[in-house]
Amino acid sequence: MSRHLAIVPALNEAGAIAAIVAEIREYAPGFDVLVVDDGSLDDTAAIAAAAGARVISMPFNVGIGGAVQCGYLYARDNGYAIAVQVDGDGQHDPRDIPRLLAALHEEPVVEMATGSRFLGEPSGYRPSRARRAGIGVFAMLVSLITGQRVTDATSGFRMSARRGIELFARDYPHDYPEVEAILLLHAHRLRVREVAVGMRPRASGRSTIGRGLQAYYMAKVLFAVAVGLLRARPSVERGKP
């Protein structure tokens, strides 16, 4: 068994999942692949298994946060030292996984490396004006709270070391979790580094945040951030479990 794991949450991604599993195995051969099938109504689970992934099938749809936390629980319980989240829709490019791994071990060492669509050369990713504005608001807010420049607070392409795995296994935001997860790490004094990555068009399915839900998404995440800042959390000293 490898000490590295790729967690691939997937909901009705039968059209993309085989290619994603194949790309991870090709470009990040040191990573085991775990597909967490989040109550799909299509053949996502069977196709992922046939492509060579390990598969956990949720009994019903628990949402992206619950599916990802299931992956972290698996990583923790099976002794993985590194875990990377890769969306099952084909937007994240597995060729960037080795770059995330290298960034995780750069000095100063961090507990999570996050792929940013807005660092370095333009990647071709062009969100709508409303979505870009929302991403900018979250980036500014997270930068202000953490005291560290963050350019892409909503990225789901992220790699965690062992302490991050243990934290997310026991406490992970469940609804639109990306922004809250960064703040959760900050609350536990765990460090984060961004890495420039590309972003591809979806290979199948559709986003759970449609145009009609973008305002709701922003309001919900902002409320969750406010609640999270008031929530008491145990502090974690560096070098201690």
Image (cartoon, grey):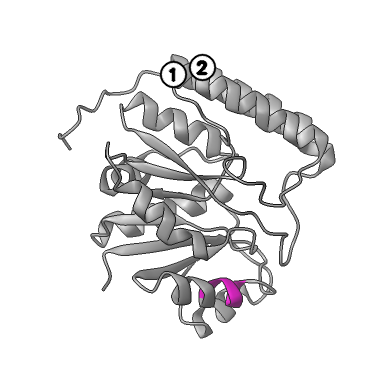
* Furthest-left residue in this view: 240
Task: State the residue at coordinates (53%, 41%).
Answer: 174
In what element is the residue under mark 1? loop
**Looking at numbered disc 1 in the image, what kind of residue is underneath it?**
Gly
Q: Residue at x 61, y 45 (%)?
A: 117
- Residue placed at 66% from the left, 51% from the top? 123
Furthest toward the bottom, the residue is 50
Residue labelled with disc 2: 144
The residue under label 1 is 147
Kindly check if marks 2 and 1 are in contact, taking CB atoms under 8 A apart as contact. Answer: yes
**Residue 103 in the image: x percent, y percent?**
37, 48
Gap in angstroms between the C-alphas marked 2 and 1: 5 Å
Residue 114's spot in the image, x, y percent? 47, 44
Horizontally, residue 224 falls left or right of residue 102, namely right
Neighbourhood count class around disc 2 (C-alpha, 10 Å): few under 14, some 14–19, many 20 upward: few
Look at the image and give the residue range highlighted in magenta.
17-21
Label 2 amino acid?
A: Leu
Q: Position of residue 110 (x, y in %)?
A: 31, 39
Q: In the figure, 236 relative to 12: above or below? A: above
Residue 175, compared with residue 197, is above or below; it is above
- Closest to the observer, 127 or 85: 127
- Look at the image and tell me whether residue 49 can be seen: yes
